[in-house]
Image (cartoon, coloured by chain):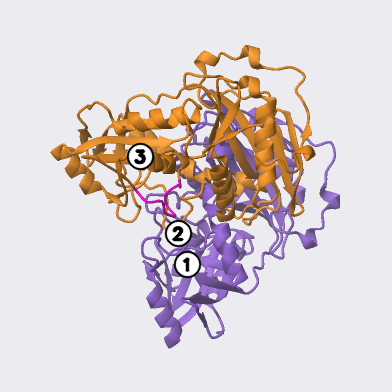
Chain colours: A orange, B purple
Amino acid sequence: MSTTQTSKIEIRKATSSKISGVDFENLSFGAVFTDHLFECDFKNGEWSNPVIKPYAPILMDPSSKVFHYGQAIFEGMKAYKDDNNDVWLFRPDENFKRFNNSAVRMAMPEVPEAIFMDGLNELLKIDQEWIQRGNGASMYIRPFMIATGAGVIANPSDEYKFMILLSPAKSYYSGEVKVIIAEHYSRAANGGIGAAKAAGNYAAQFYPTNLANKDGFQQIIWTDDATHTKLEEAGTMNVFFRINDTLLTAPTSERILDGITRKSLITMAEKEGLKVEVRPVIVSELVEAAKNGSLKEIFGAGTAAVISVIKGFSYQDVYYEMAPIENTYGALLKEKLTSLQNKLSEDTFGWTVKVQ
Amino acid sequence: MSTTQTSKIEIRKATSSKISGVDFENLSFGAVFTDHLFECDFKNGEWSNPVIKPYAPILMDPSSKVFHYGQAIFEGMKAYKDDNNDVWLFRPDENFKRFNNSAVRMAMPEVPEAIFMDGLNELLKIDQEWIQRGNGASMYIRPFMIATGAGVIANPSDEYKFMILLSPAKSYYSGEVKVIIAEHYSRAANGGIGAAKAAGNYAAQFYPTNLANKDGFQQIIWTDDATHTKLEEAGTMNVFFRINDTLLTAPTSERILDGITRKSLITMAEKEGLKVEVRPVIVSELVEAAKNGSLKEIFGAGTAAVISVIKGFSYQDVYYEMAPIENTYGALLKEKLTSLQNKLSEDTFGWTVKVQ
């Protein structure tokens, strides 16, 4: 990792650690945070005063633009500890690039690479005791940026706060996931912000997801808003479909997040000799494949769960479930990717980066 | 106004007022706030502890859901002081209803009417000295709700904060507005959150609006994202078009905000005997009308400016400007509506509500 300007990060250590009070066997995802956070403020046109300090509430003006106009973006990443107690990041350059792509789309300032990467690196070093080894344990990393400028007029803020939080995570099992295919509600517009990891994209999904939950479905597979015929993504995951022996996933677009797990799985699947087609996947094609038995698997791909197996889907009030099979592509790819991330297998792609 | 439960509002007065430091002749919209704000928190499934207290920063956990998943909604309203120093609200019931419609769509709890209305009423009474009379002066009111629950997992918060801020405003002159008609970017998806006054809807518009600004246009008229053929709204304003002597505006939908100024103008125009058609307005129809001279006026309608005259529009790199005319519908309706709001004319609609 880049260490340019590392020396500029002010370090304010916590006087005591909360770690002894944490039950690492029973972590709820995203609920527990480490002793420190990284913070850097954008004011007067520049980023300044990067600091690592004890995790604590922040003071915000009630008229802060993030509260009123929603300028807020984030990333989700993970760090892993190997058997030598070395800590590894997975493709952090991809998160960094995507973060700044999101920033541009939301009219927010880009974060310099040195601030993003050095903040990440130094914070992980300071709180490295919080990173557990093995059994799918990891450190979930949440870089985010919010508009802190005051004023209730709808224009871009001139002040921002960039922060990194760390939340220890155990192996994430999403349970048996049944999904519903969106027929009315939508996640993103053409020419909208669907490709940005913008806060507002998530809140927009809660109400339709609550409706789906009430009907017994854990997630929604979103479709294009104009015709509801193209399968897009699941809101916190990209989606893969296996029809016969071909793995299908939608191309990224301005409506679909360019998932890092998604692109890693495509590369990995191709290396394993699997046939992958990145092309629009049509709802009618999926229904037909489910009916004739050629639909073998559906899974979601994202940072939190890596791969979430989807058991079945509902469309137009009909529920389709795939017959269980052995040796799924999902299980193969999850094993390959998590082994690589955890440094249990050789990283022939150069995706893992050591924190040092 | 309802005064149920008023007695439950805790009042913590500021020890001194900032009012003497405010230049009321040179107010920047949304930048100055009064001495107090109203706050009420939602915890454990209920709203409790409503309080009016000095305007001051609030403490927020860095993992608050509003920062990460964008659960945030607001309203914009105005209060006016008449020549008897009585203070009047304009259709507050409409803002209250829309606020809770937005809350439902964003999976946030509805705010009880007594809390919304009594908070508004009591806050306006306490800071009534800040409300100026005449010359288009008003008090801009910003009720809003944010998700304060902690945790970086994408699901609805279980804690929320509802606040009301007051910002004194002078007559809002938006200048000569030239607009561009959206051909690529979009504000809202079918089945999305365009009809909600959700924070995320605004940040999404900043980048395309910046691009428009660079080309010399102050605002964008958004079109439907699927075909970019239907004229929808301007992001902070609904839009009216006068072709010959007919006033046209798009019907509200799940993509378009149900503007209170918009619906008041429609009612008022009809009462004035103007012909109003609420129907989809097609871009080609507008271009044709501009070319043949039947397009007489375009104006935006919203709380901040009431009516913003739009001088011309650009579409497919061609700029169209209307010939200046006397006795515009825009000027007539603005005069009628602001007179009513300021209690200078009789309110035959029952839209004004006294703060008492």
Please provide the residue range marked out in magenta: A250-258
> Residue sitting at 35 percent across and 39 percent down?
A269
Verify CB contact (< 8 Å) between mark 2 and mark 1: yes
Q: Is residue A137 left or right of residue A281?
A: right
- State the residue in front, B258 or B130: B258
Which residue is labeled 3 in the image?
A269
Which residue is labeled 1 in the image?
B182
Query: Residue B179 at what x, y percent from top left?
Result: 54, 71
Q: Secondary structure at mark 3?
A: helix
Per the rendering, the mark at residue A191 is 2
Question: Can see residue A63?
Answer: no
Mark 3 or mark 2: whose residue is earlier in sequence: 2
Query: Residue A236 at what x, y percent from top left?
Result: 44, 38
Mark 1 residue type: Ala
Mark 2 residue type: Gly
Q: Nearer the viewer, mark 2 or mark 1?
A: 2
Verify CB contact (< 8 Å) between mark 3 and mark 2: no
State whether residue B77 is above or below residue A318.
below
Magenta span contains residue A256: yes
Tag 2: Cα neighbours inside 10 Å, few (<14), some, or many (≥20)? many
Quadrant of residue A301 within the rendered picture: top left
State whether residue A337 is above or below residue A195.
above
